Image (cartoon, rainbow, N blue to C red):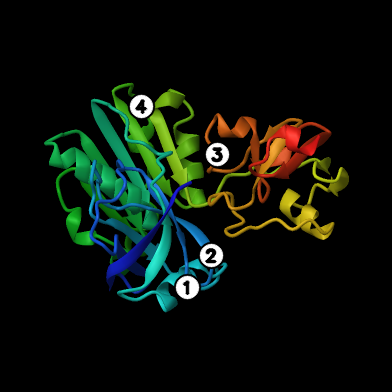
Amino acid sequence: MSVLRLRVSESADLTPTVRRFVLRDPAGLALPAYEPGAHVVVTTPAGHKRSYSLVDPGGARPREYTVCVRRENDGRGGSTSMHDDVTTGTELLVSAPVNRFPLLPSPEYLFIAGGIGITPIRAMVHRLRAEGRTGARLLYLTQSAEETPFLQEFDGPQDTVHHSDDRGLLDLWPYLAEPDDDVRVYCCGPAPLLRAVRAMTAHWRVSRVHMEQFAAAGSGFSLPFTAIWAPDGRRVEVPAHLSLLAALRRDGIAVESSCEAGVCGTCRLALLGGEVEHRDSVLTGSERLSGVVACVSRATSPEIVIGPHGPSRRDFS
């Protein structure tokens, strides 16, 4: 993944907990292209790697990337570093955009955003409306008006902004009860919202429902397995309650990591043998044939053979 060094040209609070950062090339050059739904991985001043959706519609030669970061005081430090350590003029390492949540063609759309999940949805809605498209309905669910980024932008006839502190949880069933092959559903937000939407769209065609979450999904069920570390043949036992990453470190094998939630890819390893249940939201279909994200994914075969990401199988022969 290519890495850019970008400068924070603007920084502003959108709510008491959400801050907007505008990133530009220090020399004023155009940045790599992106489309709505894309994200970048930002290395914070404290060294954390965090994935943030790009909130603007993008295009072929964007002059800036804009991300919004919600401060999580009980998180693992990435958001607090962005809020406390980044000011206008700070330079950050930022990956080129990656899009695993693309806006696909459809006659109509239903967008469901929960909290900071508005970030990729905003880019999609703005792109469609700039093109004069109708049939793009938005359900924007937040706790309160005070904690609603971009509140003033979504007050049109196709927008429903719902604050749970005032009115309780919004009943989504009336919007999802009847499957419609002319509609694509896009949902981004916290895990409870995604679970609810997934349950309510079980009778829809799978190809019509698209979701992005803040952390990779796990199955909730794990079996023990053995990981063979290819460089030296070491056998590492991975119990059901321990991640592959933690088991490797327990046995003295150093693996770099950052988010430990399956979204940044820092702890990616080479998969040289065996079968894996991929629980990350980083690797593409082809990358999953030869890689594994150690913090969340697990073996489905009794043993897997792994090594540092990059070297090929013959390097360990």
The picture quadrant where one finds residue 52 is bottom left
Residue 115 % position (x, y): 38, 57
Taking the image as shown, residue 129 lies to the left or right of residue 269, namely left
Q: Which residue is denoted by mark 3 in the rendering?
A: 283
Residue 117 % position (x, y): 38, 52
Taking the image as shown, residue 251 lies to the left or right of residue 142, namely right
Label 1, label 3: how far apart the Cα atoms are: 26 Å
Tell me which numbered mark, 2 or 3, is placed earlier along the sequence: 2
Q: Which mark is residue 48?
A: 2
Label 2, label 3: how far apart the Cα atoms are: 19 Å
The reply to whether callout 2 and callout 1 are in contact (CB within 8 Å) is: yes
**The one of 112 and 87 positioned closer to us in this rendering:** 87
Tell me which numbered mark, 4 or 3, is placed earlier along the sequence: 4
Kind of element beneath mark 1: helix
Label 4, label 3: how far apart the Cα atoms are: 33 Å
Q: Which residue is denoted by mark 1 in the rendering?
A: 81
Tell me which numbered mark, 2 or 4, is placed earlier along the sequence: 2
Q: Which residue is denoted by mark 4 in the rendering?
A: 178
The reply to whether callout 1 and callout 3 are in contact (CB within 8 Å) is: no
